[in-house]
Image: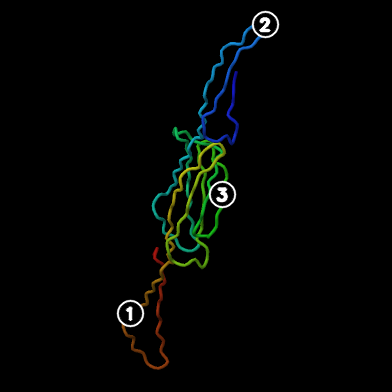
Amino acid sequence: YTTTVPNGKPNNTYSVQFTGTKSGYNNSPQFTRNVKVEKKQLTISVTPTSTQTKAIGESVVYTITVKDNNGNAVSGAKINIDDGIIAQSTQTNSTNSNGEVTYTTTVPNGKPDGTYSIDFTGTKSGYTNSSKVTRYVKVEKKQLTISVTPTNTQTKAIGESVVYTITVKDNNG
């Protein structure tokens, strides 16, 4: 005899009772066996783990890995995401056979400087959701600097020209 725990069955202990019967015989004593139903717990890891500093138009790609409470990769899980950068909640595609899926967020035009959180939670039918994992993105506008040459005072007569060379750089050089 085989019994299968159906999807959606709550965590609990359930009894299965067995009795042998046949016409012309006394029934056998009844035996009870218990089945403890426990959903497996999802755990997730999200990389990169450190706060990412990005400017408008730049992106961060996160890799999310989902495992069960035994450390096995879980395929077919989805990740619920609350993305503070774009002020939107979304869900990823399903994890692959390695339990991995990626999520990309891009700093939108006009986003004020500041640090924004992104929350990740793993979910799959038949499993208990993972704990929330939070990552941070610091939005920082690029800084421009200029240099002007020549740097010293130029002495010229009326009608003569001064040629200045102006170099503009961002904080990446």
Residue on which the image places disc 1: 151
| Residue drawn at point x = 50 percent, y = 42 percent | 129
Q: Amino acid at mark 1?
A: Thr
Quadrant hosting residue 20: top right
Residue on which the image places disc 2: 24
| Residue drawn at point x = 51 percent, y = 56 percent | 83
Residue 161 location, x and y as percent?
Answer: 41, 86
Vertical order, 73 against 122 (above or below):
above
Q: Secondary structure at mark 3?
A: strand
Q: Nearer the viewer, mark 2 or mark 3?
A: 2
Disc 1 to disc 3: CB gap under 8 Å: no
| Residue drawn at point x = 56 percent, y = 47 percent | 92
Q: Nearer the viewer, residue 88 or 146?
A: 88
Of the two numbered discs 1 and 3 on the same chain, state the one appearing first in sequence: 3
Residue 54 location, x and y as percent?
Answer: 44, 60
Task: State the CA–CA distance, disc 1 to disc 3.
Answer: 56 Å
